[in-house]
Amino acid sequence: MVGGIGKQDRQDIITGIGIWVLENGKEWKEVGRMPHRFFQGFGELDDVFASSGTDDLIYIQSYGAPALLVFDLKKNQWKWSQKCPVTKRFPLQLFSGFCFEPRLEISP
């Protein structure tokens, strides 16, 4: 699960973004928190951001920034996406899409 972490006194203001996994189907465990330097790279972040993922990679973007941030669960590493094939035309535009694994399955 990807979620915004709000201020104690103002939950509508996001001060960070966290990553959680469900352990044993019962309890959420925080496995990552976006370092402040990456959070600042988004510019002003309100309560609107988008995330998607595939395998052990989570992609996060903000309405206000053209950048795409990647969190690698296996390496516990945050990094900016080096190449993004699409540019935003408007500041409030979000990338849209889905992640999939193409493969061929043959049945007799």
Image (cartoon, rainbow, N blue to C red):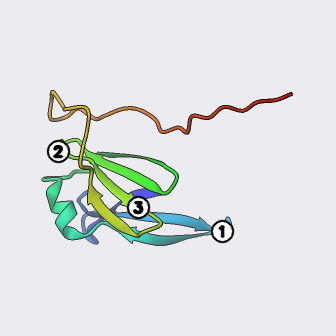
- Secondary structure beneath label 2: loop
**CA–CA distance between discs 1 and 3?**
23 Å
**CA–CA distance between discs 3 and 2?**
20 Å
User: In this rendering, would 65 be left or right of 69?
Assistant: left
Is residue 50 shown above or below 21? above
Q: Which residue is mark 2?
A: 65
Q: Residue at 18% of width from left, 53% of height from top?
A: 42
The kind of residue tagged 2 is Ala
**CA–CA distance between discs 1 and 2?**
35 Å
Point out residue 39 in the picture as x, y percentages from the top left corner: 21, 61
Q: Residue at 25% of width from left, 69% of height from top?
A: 35
Considering depth in this image, is 11 or 5 the residue closer to the camera? 5
Considering depth in this image, is 55 or 22 the residue closer to the camera? 55
The kind of residue tagged 3 is Asp
Q: Residue at 67% of width from left, 64% of height from top?
A: 25
Label number found at residue 72? 3
